[in-house]
Amino acid sequence: MSLKGAGYIVGAYEHPTRKAPDKSVTLLHAECAKGALEDAGLTKDDVDGYFCAGDAPGLGPLSMVDYMNLKCRHVDSTDVGGSSYQVAVGHALEAIATGRCSIALITLAGRPRSEGMATGTAPRAGNPAQAEMQFEYPYGPATANMYAMCAMRHMHQYGTTSEQLAWIKVAASHHAQYNPHAMLRDVVTVEDVVKSPMVATPLHRLDCCVISDGGGALIVTSPEIAKSLKRPLVKVIGIGESPKHQAGGEIDLTFSAAAWSGPPAWEMAGIKPSDIKYASIYDSFTITVLMQLEDLGFCEKGQGGKFVSDGNLISGVGKLPFNTDGGGLCSNHPANRGGITKIIEAVRQLRGEAHPKLQVPNCDLAIAHGTGGSLGTRHCGSTVILERE
Amino acid sequence: MAYVQRKIPFIGTPDTNPETKPFWDGCAAGKLILPRCTDTGKFIWYPRAISPFTLGPVEWVEVSGRGKIYTFSVMARAETPYAIAYVTLEEGPSMMTNIVDCDFATLKVGQDVKLKFVPTEGGPPMPMFAPA
């Protein structure tokens, strides 16, 4: 059974906050839920399926459905980090197609900024019983240096340069100048990026995403219900998810899990990368974007550096407008998980509701790809392809 | 930027994953002892007592301690900067580690390195590598 077109995204909401010391994470989840339901023209009592990731406060989804007083027939708290929300869209399609729910609510929220979390540079001690923990933690794996090792290998193998990576940030900053909620609204140059302080070689400060509070929510529903609502129709036509890891020591950091999650999504959608008018690409770091673009087939493997250069990702300038909200690099990275905001901006573009300066003309096909976990050790790639009907 | 020894944190105890005792005993004795898949003969990183290649048995075997840097990154933002790396061992697998006793600025992907054990806080010494 193909899930192509089995669900539509009818509600999308991004919390405007970037710093919320006066609100709990649960309240932020609920505010996002309210926003997405209002966007769809639905109420909380319409929801019969709820999706969050494992970071939502409580045991899986239980505390959240209690807090929001949702009466659900189906819940799912699959956690694959920042890519959980693309995965949730796919799982919502499966649940809708098999009659387990009809209106699915997906929420994300968090406030690492208010909590003073050194997201990128502090190694995080986990449960020592976690299989790899004792064999990795002493070496100081943080987020930044894990992605940096991928960048270092990519540079060695393909000749990618810091200047090429910088173009990704430059493009994001060109977009963020129009987003009043973005944390970093100043347009930057390649020189600004490569002269910013080194965080973890070869990644500079401006190669890294922001640390922000906030959240987002989505409503996914059946074709019948979607067509009864008053919003533009955004159909899910392709989904894919795949984890990638160290393979017992046969480690290859030159590609991401997008190389595995992309092909089934393209096949389901029946389209190819050159058909895409707008791309939301997970941008925890500049290298994340570059590798995903290659692995999703937007350019040949190893040619990502050339592809992103000279403004090719800037809306109205280049061939592939990306992250027109400013993305994680400039706008926000709520809960250190950027998957949901990728989908939200793709929905805006398909509805024609992006900023007028950045709206892609006749935007009928978009992709929203997430990478969750750590690119240098174990992560998940998840791909959603959307069509405006 | 020259290497300065940092405090190496250790988490849990060698008893946390009791089946990996041969690895920890090796560390205590200054030997890098890794599991090798009995069925395929392939060495395994990170240590575990069931083969990730076949879910079959493993045997614990000392390796040479010679390898090449697969990739690395110097954490410039840390209080004491350090170089995390994957080193591809002569025997096959790539392992996460640190590169020590070096000028960080001269490190290169593909560089030959050799094993050196470095003390940790509250745990056994951990295998790291220095330029060969």
Image: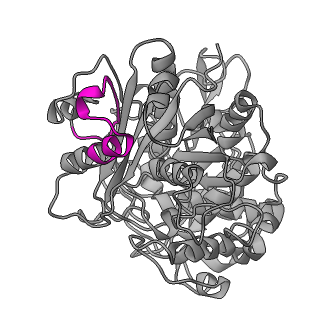
Q: Which residue is drawn at 42% across and 66% down?
A: A121
Place of residue B97 in the rendered image (x, y in percent of width and height, measured from the top left):
56, 54
The N terminus of chain A lies in which quarter of the figure? top right
Nearest the eye: A143 or B40: A143
Nearest the eye: A172 or A60: A172
Place of residue A239 in the rendered image (x, y in percent of width and height, measured from the top left):
61, 32
Magenta residues, start to end: A34-57
Residue A109 appears anywhere in the view = yes
Left or right of A283: which side holds A154?
right
Left or right of B41: which side holds A383?
left
Left or right of A91: which side holds A243?
right
In magenta stretch: residue A141: no
The C terminus of chain A lies in which quarter of the figure? top right
Residue B17 appears anywhere in the view = no
Up-down relation of residue A12 to residue A314 (above or below): above
Specify the quadrant of the image occupied by residue A49.
Answer: top left
Place of residue A246 in the rendered image (x, y in percent of width and height, measured from the top left):
61, 39
Place of residue A33 in the rendered image (x, y in percent of width and height, measured from the top left):
29, 42
Nearest the eye: A255 or B64: A255
Q: How is the image coloured?
A: one colour
Q: Which residue is drawn at 34% across and 50% down?
A: A125
Nearest the eye: B75 or B98: B75
Count the labels in the image.
Answer: 0
Left or right of B71: which side holds A351?
left
Up-down relation of residue A91 to residue A280 (above or below): above
Specify the quadrant of the image occupied by residue B8.
Answer: bottom left
Specify the quadrant of the image occupied by residue B91.
Answer: top right
